[in-house]
């Protein structure tokens, strides 16, 4: 192994055209004493120079020590001169991440991932959907992932936490104890600020859910769910939709074997049955 204090020759790091190789010591910094003198004049925060300048693999190195965390590391001197290293990572806003906790329970691992997502929504402006959460004042009020996992396992237990989503009861409230519940996706998707709805039997019903209620009340209702959704978005009331007929009879008939989703119906009713509020006679399929 070559002596670390050996100074490289004058033209060792030059290209044939005379330019210095990128990432190597410049001409006026090949003298270890001058390099060390220049390094000592730099403001490196809590880092201090802990060794002489030495060469390895045609690069000049120096060892650094942090007075705050006590860590010792080596750095290429060019990184110090260029500003690539200005301080120890323990002093920057991007802290050195703590070692990950290894969970033995699959439920804890699932909840840890959920906590990471909701925390990003509330605290990271770069996260997808931040403007719908942290951007409008929604906060994550759990102090740590351990507190969140413990609270969920005690108050909202579930076998696997698969197939359910963590929903805020008050859509304008925070992620905090007392404002969380486990719901299927259809319930969570229905609890949105941009939800468009229509009044049916005195209840506010989402456009996408209206067909399921109409089909439950009128099993012979001929229109497809996509048609009901489109008509509702065009401004038609449920009464008008029930009386609506195709302007051009014919074409492929609607699949009558499609049944309403009982989970969606249960969002608006305690049972899946209710009295039709218009008429009970059969529909004309013309």
Image (spheres, grey):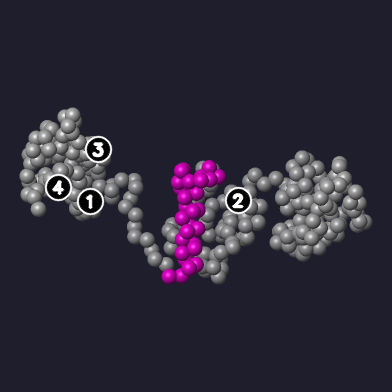
- Indicate the secondary structure of the residue bearing disc 3: loop
- Indicate the secondary structure of the residue bearing disc 2: loop
Q: Which mark is residue 171?
A: 2
**Crowd band around label 2 with a 10 angstrom C-alpha radius: few (<14), some (14–19), many (20+):** some
User: Which residue is at a point 18% across and 41% down the rendered structure image?
Assistant: 77
Highlighted range, magenta = 104-132
- Left or right for 258, reference 285: left
Q: Earlier in the sequence, mark 2 or mark 3?
A: 3
Of 9 and 223, which appears nearest the observer? 9
- Indicate the secondary structure of the residue bearing disc 1: loop
Asked if marks 3 and 1 touch (Cβ < 8 Å), the reply is no
User: Which residue is at a point 53% across and 42% down the rendered structure image?
Assistant: 131
Q: Is residue 132 above or below residue 282?
A: above
Of 157 and 10, which appears nearest the observer? 10
Q: Position of residue 94 (x, y in %)?
A: 34, 47
Residue at the disc numbered 4: 56
**Crowd band around label 1 with a 10 angstrom C-alpha radius: few (<14), some (14–19), many (20+):** few
Asked if marks 3 and 4 touch (Cβ < 8 Å), the reply is no
Q: Position of residue 209 (x, y in %)?
A: 73, 53
Of 32 and 1, which appears nearest the observer? 1
- Left or right for 77, reference 169: left
Residue at the disc numbered 3: 83
- Indicate the secondary structure of the residue bearing disc 4: strand
One can see residue 38 in this view = no
Q: Position of residue 235 (x, y in %)?
A: 78, 40
Residue at the disc numbered 1: 68
Mark in the foreground, 2 or 4? 4
- In space, the residues marked 3 and 4 are separated at their CA atoms by 21 Å
Q: Earlier in the sequence, mark 2 or mark 1?
A: 1
User: Which residue is at a point 46% across and 43% down the rendered structure image?
Assistant: 126
Residue 33 drawn in magenta: no
């Amino acid at each position: 192994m070559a002596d670390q204090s050996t100074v490289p020759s004058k033209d060792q790091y030059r290209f044939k055209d005379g330019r210095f190789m990128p990432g190597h010591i410049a001409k006026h910094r090949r003298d270890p004493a001058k390099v060390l003198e220049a390094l000592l004049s730099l403001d490196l925060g809590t880092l201090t120079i802990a060794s002489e300048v030495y060469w390895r693999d045609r690069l000049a190195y120096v060892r650094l020590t942090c007075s705050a965390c006590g860590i010792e590391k080596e750095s290429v001197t060019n990184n110090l001169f260029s500003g690539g290293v200005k301080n120890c990572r323990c002093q920057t806003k991007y802290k050195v991440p703590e070692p990950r906790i290894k969970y033995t329970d699959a439920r804890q691992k699932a909840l840890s991932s959920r906590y990471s997502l909701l925390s990003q929504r509330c605290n990271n402006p770069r996260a997808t959907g931040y403007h719908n959460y942290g951007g409008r004042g929604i906060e994550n009020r759990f102090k740590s992932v351990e507190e969140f996992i413990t609270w969920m396992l005690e108050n909202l237990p579930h076998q696997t936490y698969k197939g359910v989503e963590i929903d805020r009861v008050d859509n304008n409230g925070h992620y905090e104890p007392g404002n969380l519940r486990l719901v299927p996706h259809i319930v969570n998707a229905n609890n949105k600020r941009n939800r468009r709805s229509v009044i049916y039997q005195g209840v506010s019903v989402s456009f996408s859910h209206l067909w399921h209620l109409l089909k439950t009340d009128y099993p012979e209702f001929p229109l497809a769910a996509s048609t009901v959704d489109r008509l509702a978005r065009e401004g038609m009331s449920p009464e008008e939709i029930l009386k609506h007929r195709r302007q051009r009879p014919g074409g492929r008939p609607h699949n009558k074997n499609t049944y309403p989703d009982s989970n969606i119906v249960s969002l608006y009713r305690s049972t899946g049955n209710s009295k039709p509020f218009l008429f009970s006679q059969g529909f004309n399929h013309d």
